[in-house]
Amino acid sequence: MTDVSVALNCPACGGAISVAEGVDTVVCSYCSSTLFIEGDRGVTTIAFRNRLSKQRAVDASRRWWSKGWKARDLKRAGKIVEVYPIYLPFWRATTRVAGWICGYEIRRHTDSKGRVHEQKVPKEVMVLRDYQFSEIAADPGDLGIRSLRNFSGETSFADFDMIPTFEATNSRDDAVAHAKQEAISRARSSAGIPRVTMERLHIFPRRLSMVYYPVWVVRYEYRERMYLTTVDGVTGMLLSGRAPGDPLFQSLAITAGSSVGGLLAALGIMLSTVRAEVAFGGILAGLAVLYLTYRFFRHGSEIIEGDFRHKPASMSQTVKEFQDIARTLQGDYR
Amino acid sequence: MASTKCPKCAAPVTFDTGTKFVKCSYCESQIFIDRSGAGFYYAVPFSVAEADAIGLFKRWAAGPARAKDLDKHAQIAGIRKQYFPVYMFKRDVKGREEVLVEPAGSTTLPGLHKLRIPAGDIKIFDEGFDIGGAELVKPDIEMLSYMDSLPGKAKEQALVYFPIWRMDYVFDQKRFEVVIDASTGEIFSANFPARSSTAYMVVAAAGFVAFALEGLLALSSLAVAASLMALTVVGIFAASYYVARRL
Amino acid sequence: MKVVQVRCPSCNSPIYSKQRDRLFYCDKCNVIHVRDGGVDKIDFEIGEFKSEPREERVYVPFWRLYCSFVIRSKRVEGGHVFRLVSWMRGEDGSGTLFIYIPAADLDTAMFKRLAVEFTLSSPKYNTRLNFGSTPRMPTVISRDEAKELADFVVVTMEAEKPGVLQRLDYSLIVNSTKMIYLPFGIGPGGMVPAF
């Protein structure tokens, strides 16, 4: 393997030069010629400094144990086995979207005589915004992390030799393509035009960098089972985790859900003498409540936080899914 | 750590997996590592020990999709520590970077639908690398056999060994297999004893229908309906608690 | 990866510049070139400052695109005036115009303001041959990106008129591009044109 090393010299004066990843031009420090890097020049790389102690990572995980509907004896029976920091690689891209979306919305209103009127409200919305995107640059496995939630903090490579660094294995151009897709769909949802008659959007990838982000992995044992949580090494927030659930909470949920749901349906049917749609609405609302609580009843024996590949549903997860949909519709997610 | 010679002063220079630029510690010159022409051997270290692997399996077995109490009743029949090989190719296809992962052997892993390299602190695999007693699954397809048919120009190619625990267990007199990714702890399984949702659905549906009917009954007789509802609450709670614990 | 010295494609003299810029300016023979894949000379023009400097001076790069424009059909709701025709030279929904695209790294609001303002009324300025000692802002928008942005500017001007735009079927052909360095002053209130 002697042929892998290539010396970097100034082609003008022969002096040694120093090239940072991701730049396309450098100035020779000897003869001050402007030099241009052709071909693969890599991407700008930054690392965030870890700000968490081992104890704070453990505390964050323990705090999470006592929140929500997890096993009641988790605080007693849970035993922390191993705590260690890692650096995870993320692609971070800024994408500018410039364009217009035109279309209309149909509004319905009922007048005093009970007649329904349809009104077409034309709309034109300009989109001119920079969107931030991030995506893990390796296969996340069972870490439950897919994107960055925090973009600020002290950047330094000081901890780089001490903390195991996970390698980037995903293609950077795939990440750019995902960033473009996401920017377009966020631009569309921020415009909020239900019926589009014209759409002219242009996407410009602005910046791409590789971010190494410190994450603490906390492994713990509960009744011979091994669970894992991850904690943000900059903000100290819990990023992802699994924890045992409790059958008591599962059965309380379905008892409450089936009673409230059933009574809502009954109420709807009783009021159907006023208007037929009420019965329909009541039954639908009742079934929705039943469905939410059923999912927790069925899958609540394991509580999950974070972005896992196979994400079974827990109550808070389902509520979050609905919130996410609502937020995406408002266009301000992430 | 791999090693190469400094093109200026010929001193040995070491570099790690993801490194693009290194500085020679003798003459201080900056060196670019060009991986396009060489094949590398990489390996991801084990971060899950045997006891942890069993613990992870039990957590997975106790999950809601698995048969009730699988974690308690599954008999572990065997566990093997292995390094599983795959090829990773980084190509430049018309200016676009593409990463392709291809099989290095005819053996496949159950439950791993798409071949991939789990996240990990990838190290250069040489004499100095400690495999920790793991069995190396030998690649039986050569790297070169892919090189000609791949699109674009080479940027980097490597044989990557990733760490797994292969486990066999017996449940209800049947044998099953799981693979535990020993870097992030992810569990792969093609088939496993599954838990039926029927009992859960029956309880939920029964509760809903009972309350809906009792709600309607309240129109004619509030007292009867209320007492029936109280009974149903107790009944549903007891039934669902039993289902959640036992079924 | 390969490191090459940046030399002027016209007079072959090396270029010395401290700032990072897509465009390389040769002060020996007054030629600008770009290196996106290959080496391309760029046609450019420098505007003269109108008055004596009161504030910090800077040159802001703009791509000026000379475009032909054909509107095939349009639909606007609620508005009755279709103004696009009025500012274009030509009739029957077709004509030619200059579109100005700021090429420096500006925030989105500033970008839009300058683009629309200058395209609606082309800036009038005297030209000069070199930059003198005035610094110039680096160019971050490529010529190809400028062509896409021209499309955005056209729709913007059309949409920002009375009435709600519903459909605009048109074609925009870029006949030629030129880099224009326009003089600006940086005062307490931000960047203001100084030509």
Image (cartoon, coloured by chain):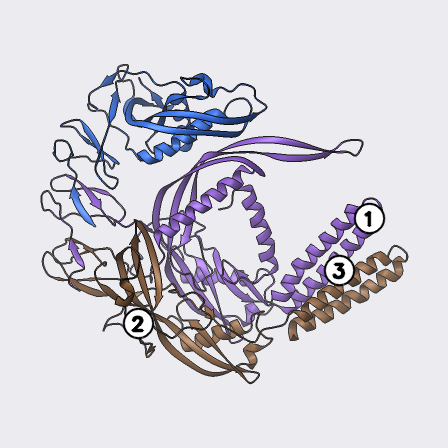
Chain colours: A purple, B brown, C blue
Q: Nearer the viewer, residue A178 or C66?
A: C66
Numbered disc in front, either 3 or 2: 2
CA separation in Å, label 1 and label 2: 70 Å
Q: Are marks 1 and 2 on the same chain?
A: no
State the image coordinates of residue A95 (x, y, percent, origin top left). Answer: 40, 42
Residue at coordinates 71% horizontally, 56% vertically from top-left? Answer: A287
Q: Nearer the viewer, residue A293 or C116?
A: C116
- Answer whether residue A166 is visible to the viewer in this image: no
State the image coordinates of residue A135 (x, y, percent, origin top left). Answer: 42, 52
Q: Nearer the viewer, residue C33 or A76?
A: C33
CA separation in Å, label 3 and label 2: 61 Å
Q: What residue type is disc 2 on?
A: Ile
State the image coordinates of residue A14 (x, y, percent, origin top left). Answer: 9, 46
- First in sequence, mark 1 or 3: give its number: 3
Q: Secondary structure at mark 1?
A: helix
State the image coordinates of residue C131 (x, y, percent, origin top left). Answer: 21, 24
Numbered disc in front, either 1 or 2: 2
Dot label at residue A259: 3
User: Which chain letter matches label 2?
Assistant: B
Occupied quadrant, residue A257: bottom right
Q: What residue type is disc 1 on?
A: Ser
User: On the image, numbered disc 2 is attached to which residue?
Assistant: B141
